Image (spheres, rainbow, N blue to C red):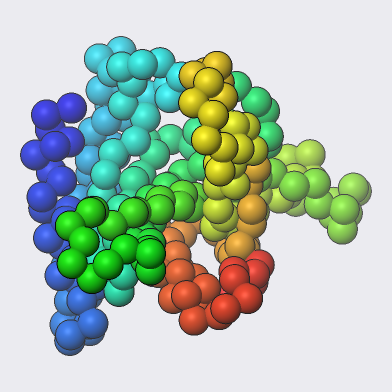
Amino acid sequence: SSLLYSCQPYFNHLESTGRSSVSLCAHNPLLSFSQQLCDRLEQLLLTYASHDLISLDEAEPNSISHFCVGQVQLGQMKVITFRYCKPTPYLSRVDTGVYKRMRWNVERRQEDHRRGEDSEEEEEIQTDYYFLCYEDIHNTHADPDSESEDASNNNVVRMWSIGQWVQVKPERTTDNLYDWILCEVPEASYRRLLFLGRNEPSSCTATDYLQQLLLTCHQDTGGCKAVIP
């Protein structure tokens, strides 16, 4: 874990500088280096896991299932990016058929007009969670007599998307502390917002998509809607 913490300042610098709106094209090499650092760190953790030095199982308390790959300020939003070392079930105790590969914690400051201008109270921060996920979908258009690779894989197509964590249990707005105490693992649905097709995007490209989605949702008063790039 100390290795991951030591890498985080470098990720933060590369992502925040590389995604700056000033001379964005000139900062592309920084994002490329950030992607290389992410890939190398992921491979290192997978190697450790293959020798039983660490666990990648999210259900285990001391596991290292994911690591932070930087954060960036996007207007009034702070986006913190995490990469899962391997495809991980969306919910640890429920088989949804959805597997997550990345997570973004998006922190938004909530304005409270009831407070006075001279109030020293801290601003309320709301955190939303977005994921890069895939799910294997049955291809109803596949030719059952075909000898192609797709047909040999039980006519299944792997589709990638970016979606949002929608809290189901306990209810996100509940004020009852016991609801959270009695719930060992929160449950949520996966709200698909951006369909990416069959190919897995790199962590850098996926974050580009997420930022575009957030900016679109911020400008659209009707909220986020599922789209295909």
Q: Position of residue 30 (x, y in %)?
A: 16, 68
Quadrant of residue 163 within the rendered picture: bottom right
Seen in the image, is 190 located left or right of residue 184? right
Residue at the image position 40 percent from the left and 53 percent from the top: 126
Quadrant of residue 34 within the rendered picture: bottom left
Q: Position of residue 42 (x, y in %)?
A: 29, 39
Where does the C terminus fall, quadrant-wise? bottom right
Residue at the image position 52 percent from the left and 73 percent from the top: 217
Residue at the image position 15 percent from the left and 62 percent from the top: 14
Residue 203 visible here: no
Above or below, 94 relative to 35: above
Q: Position of residue 214 (x, y in %)?
A: 45, 69
Of residue 138 and residue 206, the one placed in the foreground of this image is 206
Seen in the image, is 189 located left or right of residue 13? right
Residue at the image position 62 percent from the left and 32 percent from the top: 169
Q: Position of residue 22 (x, y in %)?
A: 18, 85
Where does the N terminus fall, quadrant-wise? top left
Residue 54 visible here: yes
Quadrant of residue 114 within the rendered picture: bottom left
Q: How many discs appear?
A: 0
Of residue 138 and residue 178, the one placed in the foreground of this image is 178
Above or below, 155 relative to 62: below
Of residue 187 and residue 211, the one placed in the foreground of this image is 187
